[in-house]
Image (tube, rainbow, N blue to C red):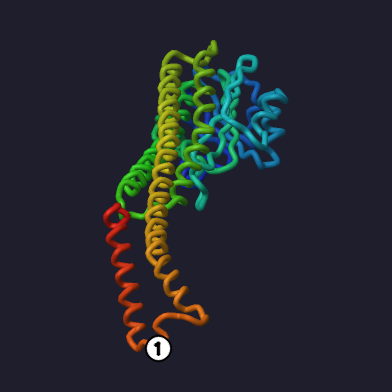
Amino acid sequence: MTDQQTKNELKLPTPTAFSYMLDGRGHALADDPLNQSNDGKSKPVRGAFQWQHFLRNDERTRPELLALAGDQFVVDALTAAETRPRCTVHGDGALLILRGINIEHGAQPEDMVSIRLWITEGRVLSVGQRPLKALNDLISAMARDQAPKSPGDLVAKLALRLVDEVEPLVADINSQIDDLEEKVLDAVAETSRGSLADIRRTSIVLRRYMLPQRDALTTLLIEDLAWLKERDRSRLREASERVTRLGEDLDAIRDRSQVVHDQLMDKRAETMNKQMLVLSIVAALFLPLGLLTGLLGINVGGMPGVDNPYAFSIVCALLLAVGGFQFWLFKKIGLV
């Protein structure tokens, strides 16, 4: 593959399938894993390793992975339809499944996509299905001669870049919950329960993947693998701690959103109670007045004032007096 072809490949939203031979000194040479002459059995030079990435829905992926990994368990895990972050040591290799932000157009960021890896000393096999910014960042770094120097270094850099993608999203959610808290404290501003529900849903979904991802990185960190150097362990430890902090932030966001929800419900209940109080006062004010007018309106004999031309004025004055007395009484007891 020429340099121009490699540059064109880097401009794609995500690589369809790629392979790099990394020399362990920061340099990488790209080729095509599906049309390579290497049978996967030749011994690489000291410190060099190969990174091959495949699309899960490509019909050529499964047989190629089986030929390279030589283990049905590994292939089944790499091509599974549904996965969660985890780490499993199998023989002299490690099966690692991580999650990253979905960067497809129109996709929800919290709908995280998986990257599955089978890591051995001389080869890293990765399988993905949808675009992942972390892979593009690594490829761009390799184009600048900043390639990973070992399989452990590759995994550590990938894990850190995956965390880098999630941190701005969590910060944005924190900013949104801050705005909602301010609106709840403002008696005039309107707070949307739909926005609060979106924040809670996003934080719950992200937390569901962040905590297993922390456990997966911690498991890989403590395993006794020859290809995992101390420098790689240090970076994996940093990635694990950052994922832990993200999980704690998401827990805090979930708790804060519950507090905001309770405050919002209290605010609406208080508004409803004030409205019901006004209606109750109005009903209590007109209840005796309605009783008087209803009593005087019955069609029976003996009604007073039937022949008196001033009777209507007297009744109106009586109603005003009763209404004024009620208003004074309600004001005295603090209802108005």
Q: Amino acid under label 1?
A: Asp
- Placement of the C terminus among the 4 image quadrants: bottom left
Question: Is the residue 293 above or below the residue 61 in the image?
Answer: below
* Position of residue 178 measured from the top left corner of the image (x, y, whole percent): 34, 42
Instruction: Answer left or right for 92 relative to 110.
Output: right
Read off the residue under disc 1.
307
At x 37%, y 45%, the residue is: 176
Indicate the quadrant where residue 146 lies.
top left
Mark 1 lies on a secondary structure that is loop
* Position of residue 122 measured from the top left corner of the image (x, y, whole percent): 56, 20
At x 66%, y 29%, the residue is: 77
Q: How many numbered discs, if any? A: 1
Instruction: Answer left or right for 18 relative to 176.
Output: right
Question: Is the residue 56 above or below the residue 119 in the image?
Answer: below
* Res 142 visible: no
Instruction: Answer left or right for 110 relative to 81.
Output: left
Instruction: Answer left or right for 170 relative to 127.
Output: left
Question: Is the residue 283 above or below the residue 58 in the image?
Answer: below
* Res 328 visible: yes
Front position in the image: 122 or 315: 315
* Position of residue 262 measured from the top left corner of the image (x, y, whole percent): 43, 42
Residue furthest toward the front?
Answer: 302
At x 42%, y 28%, the residue is: 248
* Position of residue 26 measured from the top left corner of the image (x, y, whole percent): 42, 26
Front position in the image: 30 or 180: 180
